[in-house]
């Protein structure tokens, strides 16, 4: 990771051709699923595995939303504290160097905190999500053996939802990166405020005994 990534993390988006390839691959996977023929002897095992995959995607989605809500609550708590410290930092008695450094750190912490909140809102925004619903089960009940249809529907849900869930997980990772940097710069600003004068006195005593 280079210095630019340490200062301001950025999400590298894949080129359009790669996005088109992924979309085509998903459509191909769904076509393969729709055309699949399942062995009756193993169909119960396949249903359990399809349910497990679908439940795993649901858990990833729910976990991302929960973490985004938690991060957003933390942002809501830290933002007022951060803004309340800005006037104090501007009136420090440690000279212009301390004032400048404190304000720079607080501004950076505010920018990181705001970006963390933006990524949390992106994760929590309403998005399409496929699932096996009540009317699907009613339709499958009319079949002699509904298990192959159920497997196909579950696997199609997994393929359809995976891209959106991956996007949510990526958003949480970005929110975490910005939240971590907001916390670090916030702590540094407090340390500058609290320890500046003792450090200056100690340095003067060492340099000019």
Image (tube, rainbow, N blue to C red):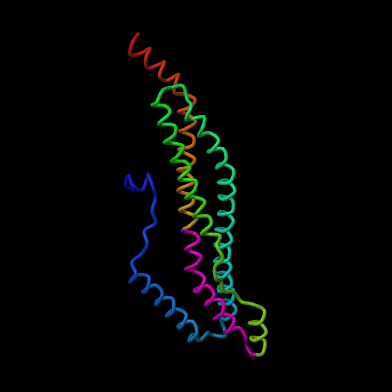
Q: In this view, does 207 lie above or below 78?
A: above
**Residue 157 belongs to the span the image colors magenta:** yes
Q: Using the rendered view, name the quadrant where residue 181 is placed.
A: top left
> Can you give x and y, in whole percent of width and height, for residue 142 in the image?
66, 90
What residue span does the magenta drawing correspond to? 143-170
**Residue 187 belongs to the span the image colors magenta:** no
Q: In this view, does 77 lie above or below 191?
A: below
* Relative depth, front residue between 145 and 114: 114
> Can you give x and y, in whole percent of width and height, for residue 23 in the image?
41, 74
Q: Using the rendered view, name the quadrant where residue 132 is placed.
A: bottom right
Q: Is the magenta stretch mostly helix, strand or loop?
A: helix
Please report the residue visible at 47 percent of the width from the left and 80 percent of the height from the top: 30
Q: In this view, does 144 lie above or below 2?
A: below
* Relative depth, front residue between 144 and 205: 205
Name the quadrant of the C terminus: top left
Count the labels in the image. Answer: 0
Please report the residue visible at 55 percent of the width from the left and 35 percent of the height from the top: 84
Please report the residue visible at 53 percent of the width from the left and 85 percent of the height from the top: 39
> Can you give x and y, in whole percent of width and height, for residue 123 in the image?
52, 59
Please report the residue visible at 59 percent of the width from the left and 43 percent of the height from the top: 77
> Can you give x and y, in whole percent of width and height, for residue 24 in the image?
39, 77
Q: Is residue 206 left or right of residue 174?
A: left
Q: Is residue 93 above or below residue 157?
A: above
* Relative depth, front residue between 176 and 115: 115
């Amino acid at each position: 990771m280079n210095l630019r990534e340490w200062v301001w993390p950025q999400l590298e988006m894949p080129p359009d051709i790669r996005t088109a390839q992924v979309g085509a691959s998903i459509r191909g996977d769904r076509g393969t699923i729709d055309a699949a023929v399942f062995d009756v002897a193993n169909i119960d095992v396949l249903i359990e595995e399809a349910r497990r995959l679908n439940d795993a995607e649901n858990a990833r989605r729910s976990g991302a939303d929960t973490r985004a809500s938690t991060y957003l609550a933390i942002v809501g708590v830290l933002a007022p504290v951060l803004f309340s410290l800005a006037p104090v930092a501007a009136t420090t008695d440690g000279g212009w160097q301390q004032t400048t450094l404190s304000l720079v750190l607080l501004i950076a912490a505010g920018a990181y905190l705001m970006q963390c909140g933006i990524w949390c809102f992106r994760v929590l925004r309403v998005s399409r999500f496929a699932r096996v619903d009540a009317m699907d089960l009613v339709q499958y009940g009319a079949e002699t053996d509904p298990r192959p249809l159920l497997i196909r529907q579950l696997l199609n849900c997994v393929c359809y939802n995976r891209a959106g869930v991956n996007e949510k997980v990526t958003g949480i990772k970005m929110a975490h990166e910005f939240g971590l940097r907001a916390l670090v710069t916030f702590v540094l600003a407090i340390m500058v405020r609290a320890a500046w004068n003792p450090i200056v006195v100690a340095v003067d005593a060492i340099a000019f005994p």
